[in-house]
């Protein structure tokens, strides 16, 4: 997993300092992403209108894997414009990611890991690698992330920037 560069977001009008005191660590963000139940995917329709939808997903080694039906709005949107944002449900412990989603066919071993993580995370849902192979599986590696804890904003406001420019499948 690539480790991001940590910095302050350029939101000085909110009183965010330039210092490092209070900035969040990537390990905090990584844990929130791993433990989250629902992930909101924001995509853009070909006509420019926004679309947001919650999905179940798994975060494994810095990669978010999520699936969707071939006819869903998000699949059509991502096919036309792969840039999305992903955020968790909490407005108190905020995590927002931006980057590209890539339709992928992960290797069988990777699919086994994804299926096992779905089973661990979502009671009553136990997909197999074969089940996942039949779905539209997206691979999302963030290019940037914003995170903060609302009770301690703006002190905790942190931006993370990843070195890669585009996600690689599986």
Image (tube, rainbow, N blue to C red):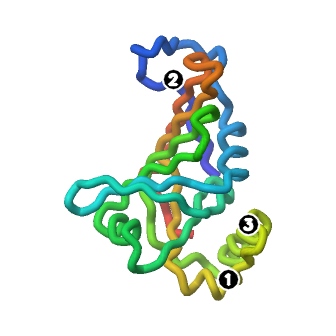
Residue indicated by mark 3: 122
> Is 13 above or below relative to 70?
above
Question: In the structure shown, which secondary structural element does the residue marked by tag 2 occupy?
Answer: loop
Find the distance from the CA under tag 2 to the CA under tag 1. Answer: 40 Å
> Is 3 above or below relative to 39?
above
Label for residue 8? 2
Q: Give the foreground label among 3 and 2.
A: 3
Q: Residue 78 in the image: x percent, y percent?
A: 37, 65
In the drawing, does residue 48 fall left or right of residue 117? Answer: left
Question: In the structure shown, which secondary structural element does the residue marked by tag 3 occupy?
Answer: loop
Toward which corner of the image does residue 130 lie, by quadrant?
bottom right
**Rendered residue at 64%/34% (across/down):** 93
Residue neighbourhood size for the residue with mark 2, other residues' Cα within 10 Å, grouped as few (<14), some (14–19), many (≥20): many
Q: Nearer the viewer, residue 20 or 95?
A: 95
Residue neighbourhood size for the residue with mark 3, other residues' Cα within 10 Å, grouped as few (<14), some (14–19), many (≥20): few
Q: Residue 143 in the image: x percent, y percent?
A: 47, 46
Question: In the structure shown, which secondary structural element does the residue marked by tag 1 occupy?
Answer: helix
Find the distance from the CA under tag 3 to the CA under tag 2. Answer: 34 Å
Number of labelled discs? 3
In the drawing, does residue 142 fall left or right of residue 128? Answer: left
Precedes in sequence: disc 1 or disc 3: 3
Label for residue 129? 1
């Amino acid at each position: 997993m690539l480790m991001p560069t940590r910095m302050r977001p350029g939101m000085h009008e909110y009183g965010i300092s330039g210092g490092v005191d209070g900035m969040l660590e990537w390990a905090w963000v990584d844990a929130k992403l791993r433990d989250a139940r629902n992930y909101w995917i924001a995509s853009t329709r070909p006509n420019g209108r926004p679309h947001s939808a919650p999905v179940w997903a798994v975060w494994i080694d810095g990669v978010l894997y999520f699936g969707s039906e071939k006819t869903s709005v998000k699949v059509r949107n991502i096919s036309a414009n792969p840039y999305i944002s992903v955020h968790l449900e909490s407005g108190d412990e905020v995590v927002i990611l931006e980057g590209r989603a890539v339709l992928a066919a992960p290797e069988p071993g990777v699919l086994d890991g994804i299926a096992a993580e779905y089973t661990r995370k979502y009671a009553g849902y136990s997909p197999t690698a074969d089940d996942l192979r039949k779905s539209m599986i997206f691979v999302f590696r963030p290019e940037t992330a914003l995170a903060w804890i609302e009770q301690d904003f703006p002190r905790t406001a942190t931006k993370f920037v990843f070195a890669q420019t585009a996600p690689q499948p599986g």
